[in-house]
Amino acid sequence: DGGITQSPKYLFRKEGQNVTLSCEQNLNHDAMYWYRQDPGQGLRLIYYSQIVNDFQKGDIAEGYSVSREKKESFPLTVTSAQKNPTAFYLCASSRDRADTQYFGPGTRLTVL
Amino acid sequence: SQQGEEDPQALSIQEGENATMNCSYKTSINNLQWYRQNSGRGLVHLILIRSNEREKHSGRLRVTLDTSKKSSSLLITASRAADTASYFCATDRGSTLGRLYFGRGTQLTVWP
């Protein structure tokens, strides 16, 4: 069964903690993306990667970090430097940078 | 910053009626895509229309693109309660980097 998985579905973070959101795909896609969605808003790009061991900042990268050590995995770390991290986080992948993006089910992060 | 601006922000119709949502954008594009999001879920890709295309169909969906007016419309015919969702348009702003820029979406409610 091919697709994109994100874990966990819900995540709670205390102030000052770093947390890592998982994104895995078995679609053999080269490109992967992380978006943030706030209530009633569209998606904003955090980071994207077009190929293994390479990634670029999106529009709201401050307070976030990523790695792309394997083609199928693109984890996102929300650091304590991100002042307002409570949001819905969506991961996507595409065959290449010009192709349709397919989305995972999302992780809802709440800061306690 | 948001690229697409969907209109209306919210739309409420009865089952069987047609639903029309519009999207305006500000820059040149290579393509425009429409996505659907059920509450609390990931996005589902509906249709991609390229800048040299004027109309595309997929089942009950019809998308038009007018590059001279920098606008697109999504028509859902014979709507069903299951069509209740948020609908987003996304463009690439003419970039070949694979980045997408999303609007804030139209919340469609279809009443049985």
Image (cartoon, coloured by chain):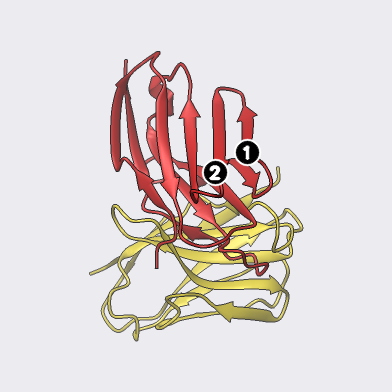
Q: Secondary structure at mark 2?
A: strand
**Which chain contains the residue that carries disc 2?**
B
Q: CA distance from mark 2 to mark 1?
A: 7 Å
The image's mark for residue B66 is 2
Residue farthest right in this picture? A28
Q: Residue at x 39, y 80 (%)?
A: A18
Residue A59 x, y percent position in the rendering: 45, 75
Residue B50 x, y percent position in the rendering: 66, 48
**In the rendered structure, are the residues bearing label 2 and label 1 in contact, judged by CB atoms less than 8 Å apart?**
yes
Is B12 above or below relative to A80? above
Is A56 above or below relative to B83? below
**Which chain contains the residue that carries disc 1?**
B
Q: Residue at x 57, y 50 (%)?
A: B32
Q: Residue at x 73, y 68 (%)?
A: A71
Q: Quadrant of residue B30?
A: bottom right
Identify which amino acid the numbered label 2 is placed on.
Asp
Q: Quadrant of the N terminus of chain A?
A: top right
Q: Earlier in the sequence, mark 2 or mark 1?
A: 1
Work out whether residue A32 or residue B20 is closer to the camera in this orientation and state it: B20
**Dot 2 alpha-carbon crowd within 10 angstroms: few under 14, some 14 to 19, many 20 or more:** some
Q: Colour of chain B?
A: red
Q: Residue at x 39, y 68 (%)?
A: B1
Q: Quadrant of the C terminus of chain A?
A: bottom left
In the picture of the structure, the residue carrying the numbered disc 1 is B54
- Label the yellow chain with its letter: A
Residue B64 x, y percent position in the rendering: 55, 36
Residue B42 visible in this rendered orientation of the protein: no
**Dot 1 alpha-carbon crowd within 10 angstroms: few under 14, some 14 to 19, many 20 or more:** few
Identify which amino acid the numbered label 1 is placed on.
Arg
